[in-house]
Image: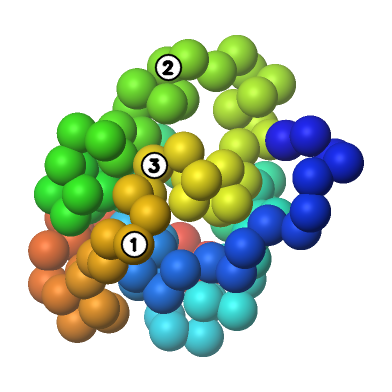
Amino acid sequence: MDRTESLPAPVRPDLVALLLSAAEAPPDWARTITPQARLDADLALDECELATLGSLLLECYGPVADLAALRGRLDLEQLAELTVADLQRELLPPGATGPGPATATATAVTVGGADR
């Protein structure tokens, strides 16, 4: 992200719900989901959780929200620096709303979450 840009927008509630569901995290984990939070280093999402998140994004928003394709275009350094704000900017259609917490939880694939 260009550091001369303004601060990122707040994280959309629908994205928070999907991240919580993919990580099988308790609701209070949501406070760690900030625009600047890196998926790898800060949120500690593993490959299974990222795959689940990718599936949930596709289910909710369709092919425009293809996390696997986005990650496939990035090198290792860019993957390590991928933030919640990057996901929101690159994958979520403006004005679209996704599931609430109950819907996201109901559609999640069971994945072993740890330390959440």
- 15 or 29, nearer to the observer: 15
The percent position of residue 20, horizontal first and vertical second, equals: 39, 68
> Amino acid type of disc 1?
Gly
Q: What element carries label 2?
A: helix
Q: Do the residues labelled 3 and 1 touch (CB within 8 Å)?
A: no
Tell whether label 2 touches label 3 (CB within 8 Å).
no
Q: Mark 1 points at which residue?
A: 95
The residues bearing labels 1 and 2 have C-alpha atoms spaced at a distance of 26 Å
Q: Which residue is drawn at 45% across and 25% down?
A: 71
Which residue appears farthest toward the bottom when viewing the image? Answer: 28
Q: In which quarter of the image is the N terminus?
A: top right
User: Can you tell which quarter of the image residue 32 is in?
Assistant: bottom right
Q: Name the residue under label 2.
A: 72
Q: What residue type is labelled 2?
A: Gly
Residue drawn at 21 percent across, 71 percent down:
99
Amino acid type of the residue tagged 3 in the rendering: Leu
